[in-house]
Amino acid sequence: MAEETTAPHPFVGMWVTADGFIRQELLPDGRYDEARGNRRSAYTGRYTVTGDHIDYVDDTGFTATGDVRDGVLYHEHLVLYRETPAG
C-alpha cells in the first residue's frame, strides 16, 4: 500500500512586513511563530485556515485574524508579504 503524502497548505511559510521588522512563520502543523525585530518567538500559537481567512490564537489566549488577498497577508493592522527563498 502506497503512503499518501499531503502537500502543506499554500499559506505555510514565512511572511514578512515590507521593512522586515515582523516575520511570521506559518508552520505546517497549524502553529505559528512571530518574530519582531531582534525578539525571536515574540508571539507563538496556533492558527486555522478557512478559505482565505486565518484565525489565530496565541499561547496566552489572545485572538487575531488575517486574510490573504492577491498573495498578501492582511493580519489585523499589518501587511505581510510572502518571503521567497534567496537563490
Image: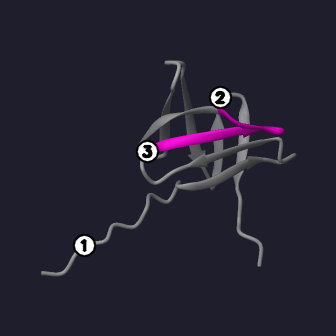
Query: Residue 30, labelled with which disc?
Result: 3
Seen in the picture, residue 82 relative to 30 is either above or below; the reply is below
Mark 1 neighbour class, 10 Å CA radius: few under 14, some 14 to 19, many 20 or more: few
Task: Tell me the SS state at disc 2.
Answer: loop
The residues colored magenta run 31-42
Q: Nearer the viewer, residue 29 or 51?
A: 29
Name the residue located 12 percent from the left edge and 81 percent from the top edge: 1
Amino acid on which disc 3 is placed: Gly
Q: Quadrant of residue 37?
A: top right
Q: Nearer the viewer, residue 85 or 71?
A: 85
Amino acid on which disc 2 is placed: Glu
Q: CA distance from mark 2 to mark 1?
A: 36 Å
Residue 82 coordinates in the image, percent (x, y): 68, 56
Given this view, does label 2 or label 1 mark the residue nearer the observer? 1
- Which residue position holds label 2? 76
Q: Quadrant of residue 14?
A: bottom right
Q: CA distance from mark 3 to mark 1?
A: 19 Å
Task: Examine the structure image and report whether residue 69 is included in the region drawn in magenta.
Answer: no
Disc tally is 3
Looking at marks 3 and 2 on the same chain, the residue that comes earlier in the sequence is marked by 3
Residue projecting furthest to the top? 61
Residue 65 coordinates in the image, percent (x, y): 54, 30
